[in-house]
Amino acid sequence: MKALRSFSQRLPLLATLLLPLLLLTTSCNRFNADGSLAPWGIALLVLDVLAIINVFNQPWEIGKKLLWAAIIFFFPFGGLLIYYFFGRSR
């Protein structure tokens, strides 16, 4: 219960800080005009792969691991931020 209260107190500040960054990055394309990955797209891909490796190294049940991996896979930028702020073991 204490963790839930702590999360609910941090959520408005976190949402206020991350919303402009999220809007900026989602409005940009990960690919260049010739179809190659943009430099920030490559960095995002590397960070996502590292996060998924980190997820499967955690001592969690397989269902929780698959859920976090799906969040990171389907929402590359937002899922990565959510995982690093709230999903990792302390």
Image (spheres, rainbow, N blue to C red):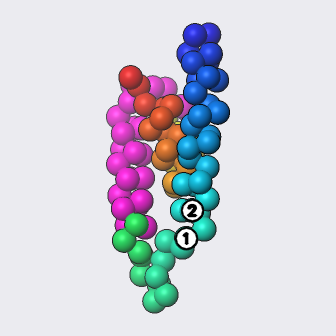
Residue 1 at x, y = what percent? 62, 10
Q: Is residue 11 above or below residue 39?
A: above
| Residue designated by label 1 | 28
Which amino acid type is marked by label 2? Leu
Q: Amino acid at mark 1?
A: Cys
**Residue 34 at what x, y percent from top left?**
45, 89
The residue to which callout 2 is attached is 24
Would you say residue 44 sits in the magenta stretch?
Answer: yes
- Please tell me whether mark 2 or mark 1 is closer to you in this view: 2
Residue 9 vertical placement versus 24 (above, below): above
Residue at point 49% right, 26% down?
Answer: 61
Q: Residue at x 42, y 76 (%)?
A: 37
Residue 66, numbered circle:
none
Q: Position of residue 68 (x, y in %)?
A: 52, 39
Residue 67, relative to residue 42: is it above or below?
above
Please state the extent of the stretch shown in magenta in the rendering.
41-64
The residue lying at 36 percent from left, 39 percent from top is 54
What SS does tag 1 mark? loop
Q: Secondary structure beneath disc 2?
A: helix
Is residue 70 or residue 63 the one in the foreground? 70
Can residue 41 be seen here?
yes
Picture quadrant where residue 10 is located: top right
Magenta: main secondary structure equals helix
The residue depicted at 49 percent of the width and 39 percent of the height is 83
Res 62 visible: no
The Cα atoms of the two marked residues, 2 and 1, are separated by 7 Å
- Circle 2 Cα neighbour tier, 10 Å, few/some/many (<14 / 14–19 / ≥20): few
In this view of the protein, which residue sits in the foreground, 23 or 89? 23
Quadrant holding the C terminus: top left
Front residue of 36 and 14: 14
Do the residues bearing badges 2 and 1 touch, measured as CB atoms within 8 Å? yes
Q: Is residue 75 magenta?
A: no
